[in-house]
Image (cartoon, rainbow, N blue to C red):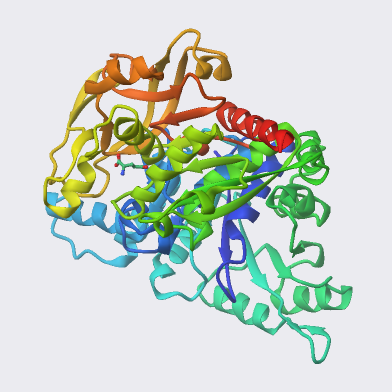
Amino acid sequence: MARYIFITGGVVSSLGKGLASAALGALLQARGYSVRLRKLDPYLNVDPGTMSPFEHGEVFVTDDGAETDLDLGHYERFTGVAARNTDSVSSGRIYSTVLEKERRGDYLGKTIQVVPHVTNQIKEFLNIGDDEVDFMLCEIGGTVGDIEGLPFFEAIRQYAHDRPRGQCIFMHLTLLPYLAASGELKTKPTQHSVKELQSIGIAPDVLVCRSEHPIPDKEREKIALFCNVRKEHVVAAYDLKSIYEAPLAYHEQGLDQAVLDAFQIAPAPKPDLSRWLDVYDRVHNPEGEVKIAIVGKYVQLEDAYKSFKEALTHGGMSNRVKVKVEWVDAEIFDSEDAAPHLEGYHAILVPGGFGERGTEGKIKAAQFAREHKIPYFGICLGMQMAVIEAARNVLGIKTAGSEEFDHESGEKRFEPVVYHLKEWIQGNHMVARKTDDDKGGTMRLGSYSATLAEGSKVAAIYGTTSIEERHRHRYEVDTKYRAQLEEKGLLFCGMSPDGKLPEIVEWTDHPWFIGVQFHPELKSKPFAPHPLFADFVRAAVEVSRLV
Ligand code: GLN
């Protein structure tokens, strides 16, 4: 039976609950425990798959094909534990399951209510995989007191009550604002937030207090007294230069010790922090710097490209350089020359995306990189743009485009070099879709294998010819022009095992020009950078040495 740690937040949002949870997971692993991290989100969407990246940040895809919150990306990057479909749930999913059951008649004529039916459904979700790990860390989205979060808070209260004593603890994150005029840290918002939590029957065991200034002993004592937690369980969270310092910083502040104390685990196993010390060293002692452009459409919100940025950072760590990521809005040069916007970068990455907006700019970015021999990494839509660019400018098919754009505009304007995929093999069965299917969860999603061509650049980078990577797309590069493109040097060097779907393309006469249909950024970790990102940054370093 796993021990459960429920992580909640108060005072304000965006305190870094996800990061604190991920860092705590990493610290428990460092002490020899197995962990799994989960996110319970109070919003009503069934999953974040249909939410705009502008609003919600990136969608993180799991091996088993779930579209989840970007916090699951943090969890995976810090613990290396591959997230699953059952590691994320929203009110929308809970309610739709309850309503399905009601329609099926599972509740036998009862009146369906938030308590107990919705809360029971949440508790059922919490139980999944309970016998697999030592610690289950469950983060509740939003802040205490939010109307939509109430069923989740009620469910975790009941859950802790149902289990044997000492099996569950509550960790609460708050903010200590600093009043410059009086030079003081204020504890009142934290007191109010804990009071709110207590009013719904939850007493926190550990308090994590975000603060821009050192927390004096006197304030710590005050918080402990008024919030009814032990003084050593009031843990400071200070701002960090890099998120990858979080495990060491939290360890220094005593978070893992406080958690083990709260479970009365004594003596606590000694931690092995070598992995994080190495990560720290690589972040803080780079031997150079490269400048990489991410040419995309959702550039106003950095969270929309979270995993890309992190994977580039990991690539930098593996080469011991700092990667300076700059965001370039592809739309700006949709109808003008791209060169002035792209000169000066050591490499260009075109990430995934949906819809036609900004695609002409991305095609120009691919052309610029190909012609100027600048390293180019095209991911998902970025690969599709690279193939369209080759079809237009190398094969001379001027109207080459993607069916996605025609579907969006409702008129036939393009010769589809990228087409809508309606049938494919997943494992050992066939999946079928229609053009007008619901938008939620109907893409080619999750982990698929690919076979790489012997002797190709990518096979050398991966060190193998058989890989598994995560997908999230509806459209696919057509093999119709494969022979013509390969003749010109654009090699289809990665294919689905049945040989039908192009997974990777590379320009053979270019130092580093690779397009992948999948999302390698989702699997990169600071302590195990993804080989493609590590090699892409290496290629950028080479360019930086030439200039
Ligand atoms: N819009 C493209 C498709 O659906 C690419 C998706 C992506 O980049 N994730 O195929």
In which quadrant of the rendered image does the C terminus lie? top right
- Seen from the viewer's position, the closer of residues 112 and 272 is 272
Horizontal and vertical percent position of residue 403? 20, 41
Horizontal and vertical percent position of residue 244? 70, 47
User: Horizontal placement of 19 versus 341: left or right?
Assistant: right
Image vertical order of residue 326 relative to residue 210, above or below: above
**Among the 4 quarters of the image, the one containing residue 34:** top right
Residue shown at 54%/49% (left/top)?
342
Answer with the quadrant where ligand 1 appears in the image: top left
**Among the 4 quarters of the image, the one containing residue 280:** top right
User: Horizontal placement of 110 versus 203: left or right?
Assistant: left
Residue shown at 64%/30% (left/top)?
528
Image vertical order of residue 474 relative to residue 515, above or below: below
Task: Spot the residue most to the right.
Answer: 217
Image vertical order of residue 438 relative to residue 427, above or below: below
User: Horizontal placement of 343 versus 300: left or right?
Assistant: right
- Seen from the viewer's position, the closer of residues 302 and 337 is 337
In which quadrant of the rendered image does the N terminus lie? top right
- Seen from the viewer's position, the closer of residues 406 and 373 is 373
